[in-house]
Amino acid sequence: MPINHWSRFGLLLGLLLVSACSPDAPPPSSVQRVDGHLDAQGLLSYDPGDYHETRQGTPGGTLRMSAALDTGTFDVHSSYHGNVQWLARIVYDCLLYQDENGKISPWLAKSWDVSEDGKTYTFHLRDDVTFSDGAKFNAEALRINLEHMRDPATKSPLAAAYIAPYIDGRIIDEYTFEAHLREPYSPFLYVLAQSWLSMVSPKQIREAPKSIAEHPIGSGPFVLQSYTREQGATFIKRADYHWAPPVTRHIGPAYLDRIELSIVPEAMTRYSTLQSKRSDFTLDAPAQNTAAMRASQNLVVRNRIRMASPYRSVTFNTLRFPFDDVRVRKAIAQAIDRDGLAWIAGFGELLAKSDYLAVNTPFYDPAYRDVLKYDVDAANRQLDEAGWTLRDAQGYRVKDGRRLSAQLLGFESPSFPSNVAVAVQADVKKVGMQLTIQMMPLAQLTDRRTAGNYDAIGGGYWHTNTPDGLYILYHSDSRASPTKSGNNLSNLSDPRLDQLLGAARRSHDPVELQALYSAAQQRLTEVVPAVPDFESQVLIAYRTAVKGLIFDAVHNTPFFTSVWLDQEAP
């Protein structure tokens, strides 16, 4: 996920031979596989019990779990990796949390006040929290963490951007901190609840900041005992921990004594070790094996949707031919079969998507979910209206002696396996467009992206717990340049959309925010900067011996403080 979060829920194998986007037989509905209740209007809700303990667990035991990828660092302030969503909760705590209704709730901050002008936030902190090196969590620790996030030496691709409006802070007393923003910024409390903005020991930040990468010191429920890059890590319980988020209803230390994490890139190995009881839990359940896992009496599969941005198969460079014409962009969006892509990438686990905000994001409006739906006839009409009425001998559209063609850049990743790229290529060919695919190393792709040297880029998603993800991806201020790391890869500059998303950042009124974000979602279906394909989903599996699993209400990922093991389970 280099800034533009790449998927982390599993290395999907290219098992389907793709001659067209859709499989030969209609894929089974993924609606029944997604956790929660998805109503006829397209709104998703979860059981409140998914987010808090319903009974006390049994202490003891070691949880053996696997993940497909290593984050490469435990310095979450310097990371953009998706696994930080769950990994940071093992070692670190955050200033704030989020409840099951999407409202910000206490964690290390007991309460807070916001000034009338929306530019001053006063946080009242707990006075009983310590880091595992003995350092206190207090106002000075909070100040040091905020400074570390935005320090150029940290090279933060995410945390720094999330607190960009922060100017400075004032320590009122040991446990009261006043944060000053340059402008109203309503997502501020929400981003402070995200794992990438966790609190690190102020002593470690001051004395040995480079050591955070492999020897992190947090205030969380577990302490890192050992870490071997690309192989795994072991965490041990912190016995004196007693400040879990109140929303979780967890009291005291974690139940588990140890967590042993193995990095297992091979999907089949993650499945076979779970099936054979050599592991208890996988954070990246292989989609191709979920049918077998669901049929097992000893395994449980969970499928959760992340808030904010769905996956995209194509992000258009709106400054370059042929995607400088919105009619071409809309035609390509309508030419791509999302149900087919979801089946190829997720084997029936993924929820197809053709609008720009995840179904469980605050202020999501389902009114525009079908505007860009798969419709080959509509796509052909759009291209005809754009003047692409002639065809050459190969069947591709031409105008003024020029073929309708473009290049799609990508790198092999879980969010954009090459078979998905080939499927997109086949779909757009049906409406007369030539799309060439160039897969390249990530570093090379990043250079091309920074220079703006591309027609379109494949893959990517953006997870955040606020609809402000739309600002990050599509506001003109978020465009990348050689001197600025931005995430508006479409290079979209639409004054109407900018006005809506900017106003949403300044508002704290829920009624006004709903109107602004609804209008922004409508506008995105009109300007079409990218092609959403399916929801960004977290697919996990575990043995029935694993009990007490709840989900982090911020990220919809597992929250291991509450997990315990039933030693008598099969």
Image (tube, rainbow, N blue to C red):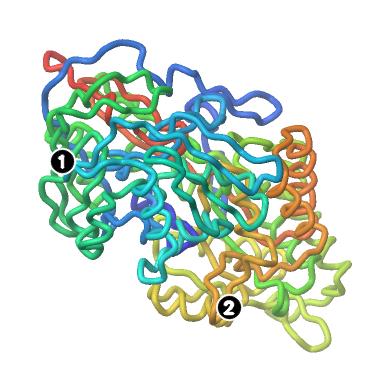
| The quadrant where residue 549 appears | top left
Inspect the image, locate mark 1, and give the three-letter code of the amino acid beneath it.
Phe
- Looking at the rendered structure, the secondary structure element under dot 2 is loop
Nearer to me, 276 or 474: 474
How many other residues sit within 10 Å of disc 2, few (<14), some (14-19) or many (≥20)? Answer: some
Residue furthest top as drawn: 55
- Looking at the rendered structure, the secondary structure element under dot 1 is strand
Mark 2 and mark 1 in contact? Answer it, CB < 8 Å: no
Residue furthest front as drawn: 173
User: Which mark is first along the chain, 1 or 2?
Assistant: 1
Q: Could you tell whether 282 is left or right of 538 in the image?
A: left
Q: How far apart are the alpha carbons under marks 2 and 1? A: 40 Å
Inspect the image, locate mark 2, and give the three-letter code of the amino acid beneath it.
Ser
Residue 557 place in picture, x, y as percent: 39, 36
Q: Residue at x 44, y 57 (%)?
A: 6
Residue 487 place in picture, x, y as percent: 56, 65
**Quadrant of the snapshot with the N terminus:** bottom left
| The quadrant where residue 546 appears | top left
Q: Could you tell whether 84 is left or right of 435 in the image?
A: left
| The quadrant where residue 50 appears | top left
Residue furthest bottom as drawn: 401
Residue 393: in sight, yes or no? yes
Residue 235 circle label: 1
Residue 481 circle label: 2
**Quadrant of the snapshot with the C terminus:** top left
Residue 242 place in picture, x, y as percent: 26, 25
* Above or below: residue 508 compared with residue 425: above
Q: Residue at x 45, y 56 (%)?
A: 159
Residue 25: in sight, yes or no? no
